[in-house]
Image: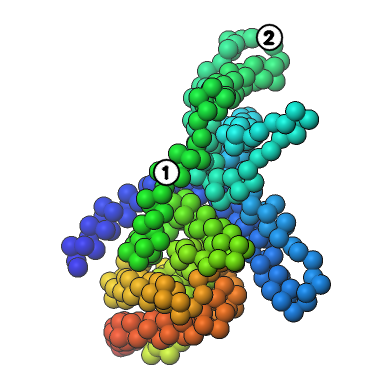
Amino acid sequence: MDRLMKWMTEKFAPRMEAITKNVWVDSIQEAIMVTLPMIFIGSLITLVSILKDFIPAMPDLTPITTFSFGLLGLFISFLTPYMVMQKKERHKIKLISGFTGLSLFLMLLSPTFGEDGSVQFVLERFGPTGMVAALLVGIVVAVVMNVFNRFSLFSKDTKLPEFIVDWFDFLVPIAIILAGGWVLIYQLHFDIFALIISVFEPLNAISQTLAGFVLFNFIGVVLYSFGVSPWVMVPIFYAIWFPAIEENAALVAKGMDPININTFETFFSGWVGVGGLGATLPLAILFLFAKSKKLSSIGKATVVPSLFNINEPVIYGAPIAFNPILMVPMWINGIIIPVIVYLALDWGLADIPSQLFQLWYTPIGISTYIVSGINGLVLLAFVLLIMFVVWYPFYKVYDLQERKKEDAEAQA
């Protein structure tokens, strides 16, 4: 264990931290973060729509979801190149880069044009289905715009106004980007969405298996236990979670059963991430009863945020990160709980989530009921019990250790 800790501390964690601070990775994360309010709006509509069961005359609010969460790909295609340029301090070209990303993304949607001037798009490609395509578009646009930003068609001592110089310098990379899209779509009849589906199909298939479901959670838990923000994995996770819940909702709308267990709702709104990634709520509650003054204080400070699935205070305050005594139970829960939840949903003991509900900060139990009903709450109670059982012996050891330190300091 000591060798593992040394390697993770000195080698792995710094390298992962370097990746998360890379301008390209950081820009993608930032682009997704900016879209969260639009995602949350869709979740709020899901919450409000529950009232329709009691008030049948209530109007249909799903168009609000369609034009918020349902346009996720469109937002990402603009924000990704914009954020890259902003972080590289290319402020002159960040807006035009975003607009170029938007233009290329719309072109890649392969719209059909009617003789009457109408345009038809496949609406689902604007949303989560198009998220990966939007990220690729954003990165390509950012790369091209960044390269051409180093050159100018005019000498430094030109007498032309600066805005005229900028206009002409922008023309070349924009023309190259859009001409490339034109060749792909209208000459080669290339369908990027079909390609992405074929590439991601094996990953999607694996992610919806028991092994894939457990692996998804465990990777995030291990990274987090070494202080690396799980947001580094978000582009991959979201590319699977959002289309999965979208497909579940579409199946239910057709009167069929949902099939995708690996969704955001399962991880953070329902059962696996109780208190936050790593299922840390039970530990925060146990700290309230600690004999160590330090841990008792941490429990009082972290239990309320943990109820809202915010666990950075307990991860870095206890700390769990780089603390072998608490890392091990976090890893154990990171394997056992996903296994239990997956099997329970797969066997029909609780409903598989089929509604968009990304309000991960909703207090424990409320979100579970919304996505899975009473049976979901029963499953939640069971996994909570398991979590407490796993955390308890390690908590006792850590509490005793900290209490001895405090007693020694007091005597000194």
Q: Residue furthest right?
A: 57
Visible residue check, residue 307: no
Q: Observer-nearest residue: 189 or 162?
A: 189
Secondary element at tag 2: loop
Residue 215: percent from left, percent from top: 34, 62
Image quadrant assignment for residue 401 = bottom left
At horizontal 35% and vertical 82% (from top left) the residue drawn is 391
> What mark, if any, has residue 410 been given in the picture?
none
Residue 158: percent from left, percent from top: 64, 9
Visible residue check, residue 41: yes
Q: Which residue in the structure is indicated by mark 2?
A: 159
Secondary element at tag 1: helix
At horizontal 38% and vertical 90% (from top left) the residue drawn is 291
The N terminus, quarter of image: bottom left
Residue 184: percent from left, percent from top: 52, 26
Residue at mark 1 to residue at mark 2: CA–CA distance: 52 Å
Q: Residue furthest front?
A: 255
Is 380 positioned to the left or the right of 391 in the image?
Answer: right
Number of other residues with Cα within 10 Å of mark 2, as a class: few under 14, some 14 to 19, many 20 or more: few
> What mark, if any, has residue 198 been given in the picture?
1
At horizontal 45% and vertical 66% (from top left) the residue drawn is 261
Is 306 positioned to the left or the right of 399 in the image?
Answer: right
Labelled pair 1, 2 in contact (Cβ < 8 Å) = no
Name the N-terminal-most of marks 1 and 2: 2
Q: Is residue 100 above or below residue 133?
A: above
Kindly identify the amino acid type of the residue bearing the numbered disc 1.
Ser
Label 1 or label 2, whichever lies nearer to me, is: 1
At horizontal 71% and vertical 35% (from top left) the residue drawn is 119
